Amino acid sequence: MPSKGVSLGLGDRVTQIRGAAKKWLLRRAERLAYDVAGLTMAIRSLLHPRRPSPAEAPADYLHWYYGRAYWALPWGPLRGLVSLIIWPFALALAVSVFTRLNGTSIRERSGVSAARQAGQQVRLAVTNAIAPFWYYMFEFYLDDHRKNVGLYLTAHETIGPCYEVLQPPPGSDDMDDKVWFANHCRRLGIRAVGVLFHLRGGQLVPNVEGMTELPDQDLFIKPRNASGGHNSERWDFIGDGRYRNSLGETLEREALTRRLAAQSLKDDFIVQPRLTVRVLTCRNEEDGFEATNAAFRMAIGGNSVVDNFHQGGIATHVDLATGTIGAASDMGIKPDMGWREVHPVSGERFCGRQLPIWPEVLDAACRIHAAFPERVVVGWDVAMLPDGPCIVEGNGRPDLDIHQRVERRPLGNDRISHLLAWNLERALAGRG
């Protein structure tokens, strides 16, 4: 296939190496952050080693398994020692940062003083491995939320050891690769958002037969192997071979092509047509796949590029039975958003609305999960188009933060936790 690119001189090679090193460091930093955040849960498992019932107490079972797996990780005891050294300093810094950011606003909203908020953050970090980030996300300054703290599932225990066991065998699929995913869906006849180009090593490589240049349509640029909306760009087609991004910058087609090619020296990116609702599906006891939770995401203000919750967007709970959406909020770590029933930018009221083609959206999510039978749990991003649902991508390690935040309750005793615990128990039994 034809490609357009830039020559790779010494400077380009250095850029590639720096990009790869940055990705490596970010992965290690995330792993360390999870080690530190989950340390007290791991220590508690040593003090209380009794195995809870996955059927009767799924949240306790998942907490227990995290603690057991923590010490069994490669260099687990050494990682625990390093985390123990870092933990008090990291906690003090995080409490200071998040209390300074949110303390006054939460005091005015709930009557809980900033000093009391700080004390609660420390106590929950010690007793339940709740980092200050989650304290504000899940509104643990509210008594009704705090009394159910043991039923909340956090990313360090799901994205970490739990999902590691539930991942498919190596080579079964390559869902994290968005180019592979789009092509796989196309081969199976599954309606999914296609990839127009693959940006790699300074080259713009077409993924559609006969396409030799950026098309006359809105474009969405995102990393090939990433989630969370990080490093994504939107370029709207404005006519005459020109595109404009969310910052108001305008580029001719050739200039945008050169920029994207140079950008791909740091990381692989893909180009998709710009078109979402997140639907969580999980394998059930009958070896079928069912939808357990859903959230509708919206872009706002400075986050007009993506609707991703982790990049400053807002989200609302979707009632699975009816497709009706409620009040929306951001991640809860900024004091000025709160809960909204009207879009903060457009002024349009969304609370109480019913999403279109909702039964078809749920059906599409469950059907595409069946096309990835080795996967236990997947978070599907689905676009609701006038002529039906269209799969954007699948996330094989979906965190539950967005669902627990927008539903304003823990999921530790919900269907998703029962299914995760059941699948985890079966996977461990299969290992002998």
Image (cartoon, grey):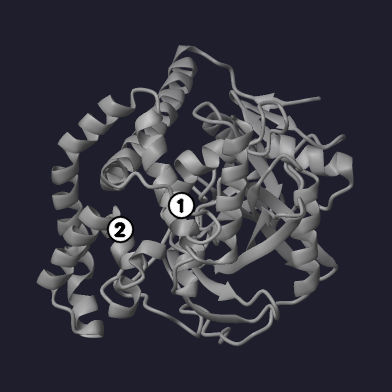
> As drawn, is 394 to the left or to the right of 345?
right
Q: Which is nearer the eye, 405 or 381? A: 405
Please state the horizontal and vertical placement of residue 28, each as a whole percent of the image: 37, 31
Please say whether residue 255 is visible from this viewpoint.
no
> In this figure, which residue is indicated by the disc labeled 2?
133
Amino acid type for the residue under numbered disc 2: Phe
Please state the horizontal and vertical placement of residue 176, each as a whole percent of the image: 63, 38
Amino acid type for the residue under numbered disc 1: Tyr
Q: Residue 105: which quarter of the image?
A: bottom left
Instruction: Indicate whether 30 appears above or below 290.
Output: above
Q: Quadrant of the C terminus?
A: top right
> As drawn, is 60 to the left or to the right of 233?
left
Q: Residue 102: which quarter of the image?
A: bottom left
Q: Residues within 10 Å of mark 1 (few under 14, many from 20)?
A: many
> In this figure, which residue is indicated by the disc labeled 1?
61
Please state the horizontal and vertical placement of residue 12, each as a whole percent of the image: 49, 19
Q: Residue 302: which quarter of the image?
A: bottom left
- Alpha carbon separation for disc pair 1 and 2: 23 Å
> Considering the numbered disc 1 on the image, is that residue within a helix, a strand or a loop?
helix
Q: Which is nearer the eye, 259 or 119? A: 119
> Considering the numbered disc 2 on the image, is that residue within a helix, a strand or a loop?
helix
Residue at the location (81% across, 44% down)? Answer: 185
Q: Mark 1, mark 2: which one is toward the viewer?
A: 1
Residue at the location (19% across, 84% down)? Answer: 111
Q: Quadrant of the N terminus?
A: top right
